[in-house]
Each structure stands twice: as structure tokens, then as C-alpha cells.
């Protein structure tokens, strides 16, 4: 909506297989007049990571196009394009404190870019856009490396348990390098509503191109994932065909 209000023409580029790395598709779809390409890595909802070599390839092939790599889930993948910023002035990497750090309500993040890009962004920057409380919380979050590592390790274990549990129940489930799992169900809306009635909230992604029947589950702690599997078992007793086998 914001892009359209500025007279831009946004285009959604989706690979024929939504679970593949999109580099080849982007190489075909980027036009000489393309001003900006926005890439999520790890992708939401697939968790697919675009390799740093591929980011470099894109930046080199289209030097007049600005590439923004959204690394909101970087802490779960460990793969980053930050090291390419000094080499490619047409690259911006963004991060957030809303995921791994758990302070989404404070609405704070940061970006890494070359000096010329930063100078241009400063012309648009509102110094009041981030309050002092958010800044202090972000500094504290960055300094607590042990919490971050413990949380990522806990989520990784929870993801393994949930993925295997879904597969053991005959579900078609997939995961990537982020903190969520995709599971295919026969009736996404019914599945989501059934879990909501048990105070479990998941996201129906079946309205996205290439994701018919898929529901995204954000992974929490091991205990939470074990509890989720128990609740899914209760739903399966009522409707054995709830999952898309």
C-alpha cells in the first residue's frame, strides 16, 4: 500500500516451487527498471534461506537495483548477508527485535548498509520513531547473549519434537531455518479454529500463492510443543481426517 501511494508498482515474485531458493526466479524476473527487490531470508513461512553467494550474485548482476534482505529470523539460521554490505552499495540488511528477542511490542529493529545508503535514509528518518524505552530494551537484549543462545537452542529442540510428532501422526509437514513449521491440512480454517478453541493460535497460510492447504505453526518451548501435540491428538480423535496425509 505504501509503495503504491508513492507511485511504485509492486510485484510478488514466487518460484514455481515455493520451497526452493528463489535466486533463479529473481534473476529472470528483475527488469532493468526494477528499483528495489525485497527478500526475506529465512523466508516466512517456508524458512528457506537464500545463500550469501546468491545475494552477491544478484547485487552484482543488477547494480542499479537496491536489494533489501530481511533477516528477521537470522538468529535461528545463522546465515547473514551483512558481510556483503561493504562490497555492494546496493544492499541493505534489516533485523528486528520482534522474534528471537521477544520484544515485538516495542517495535524496534535496525539495518546495515553502506555509508551512501545510510546518508540517503537519514534524509527520511524521523528521530522520534523509536522511543527511549525501546532503545534501552534493545541494548539490553543485545548484551544478553546467553539468553539468546538458550532460547534458540530450546526452539530448535521444540521444532524437532513438533516436526517428528506431526510426521508420526501421518501429517505432511515441512520446516526450514526459521522458528516455524508448515503442516498441510484438509481444512485450514477448521484446523485453525479448532486450535483457537483450545487457546492455541496458528496461522492459515493457504491464501498465499503456492500454499494451498498449508498452516504455519510458530515453535515455542519443548513443553509447549508437547502440549500442542496432545491437543492435536484430541482433535484427531474427533476428526481422524483433519490432517492431509
Image: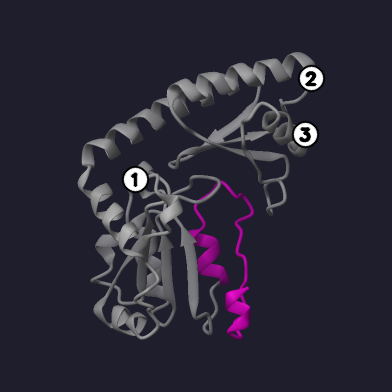
Residue 149, given in percent of the width and then of the height, sits at 27, 36
Residue 162, given in percent of the width and then of the height, sits at 52, 25
Q: Nearer the viewer, residue 131 or 150?
A: 131
Give the alpha-carbon distance from disc 2 to disc 3, as whole Å: 11 Å
Q: Is residue 14 above or below residue 74?
A: below
Magenta residues, as a range?
A: 1-29
Residue contact at pointers 3 and 1, CB within 8 angstroms: no
The C terminus lies in quadrant: top right
| Residue pointed to by mark 1 | 75
Which of the two labelled residues, at mark 2 and mark 3, occupies the earlier sequence position?
3
Is 154 left, or right, of 187 in this rendering?
left
Q: Secondary structure at mark 3?
A: helix
Q: Is residue 166 above or below residue 208?
A: above
| Residue pointed to by mark 3 | 190
Q: Secondary structure at mark 1?
A: helix
Q: Nearer the viewer, mark 3 or mark 1?
A: 3
Residue 4: which quarter of the image? bottom right
| Residue pointed to by mark 2 | 239
Give the alpha-carbon distance from disc 3 to disc 1, as whole Å: 32 Å
Residue 175, given in percent of the width and then of the height, sits at 51, 36
Amino acid at each position: 500500500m505504501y509503495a503504491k501511494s508513492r507511485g511504485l508498482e509492486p510485484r510478488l515474485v514466487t518460484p514455481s516451487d515455493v520451497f526452493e531458493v528463489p535466486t533463479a526466479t529473481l534473476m529472470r524476473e528483475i527488469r532493468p527498471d526494477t528499483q528495489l527487490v525485497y527478500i526475506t531470508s529465512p523466508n516466512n513461512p517456508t524458512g528457506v534461506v537464500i545463500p550469501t553467494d546468491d545475494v552477491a550474485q544478484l547485487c552484482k548482476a543488477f547494480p542499479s537495483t537496491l536489494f533489501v534482505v530481511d533477516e528477521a529470523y537470522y538468529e535461528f539460521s545463522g546465515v547473514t548477508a551483512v558481510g556483503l554490505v561493504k562490497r555492494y552499495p546496493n544492499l541493505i540488511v534489516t533485523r528486528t527485535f520482534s522474534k528471537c528477542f521477544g520484544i515485538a511490542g516495542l517495535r524496534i529493529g535496525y539495518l546495515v548498509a553502506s555509508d551512501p545508503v545510510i546518508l540517503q535514509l537519514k534524509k527520511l528518518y524521523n528521530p522520534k520513531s523509536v522511543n527511549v524505552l525501546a532503545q534501552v530494551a534493545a541494548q539490553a537484549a543485545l548484551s544478553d547473549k546467553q539468553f539468546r543462545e538458550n532460547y534458540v537452542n530450546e526452539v530448535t529442540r521444540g521444532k524437532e519434537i513438533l516436526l517428528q510428532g506431526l510426521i508420526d501422526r501421518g501429517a505432511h509437514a515441512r520446516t526450514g531455518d526459521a522458528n516455524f513449521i508448515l503442516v498441510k491440512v484438509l481444512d485450514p480454517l477448521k484446523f485453525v479454529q479448532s486450535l483457537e478453541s483450545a487457546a492455541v493460535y496458528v496461522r492459515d497460510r493457504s491464501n498465499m500463492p503456492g500454499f494451498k492447504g498449508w498452516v504455519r505453526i510458530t515453535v515455542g518451548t519443548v513443553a509447549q510443543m508437547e502440549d500442542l501435540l496432545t491437543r492435536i491428538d484430541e482433535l484427531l480423535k474427533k476428526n481422524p481426517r483433519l490432517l492431509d496425509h
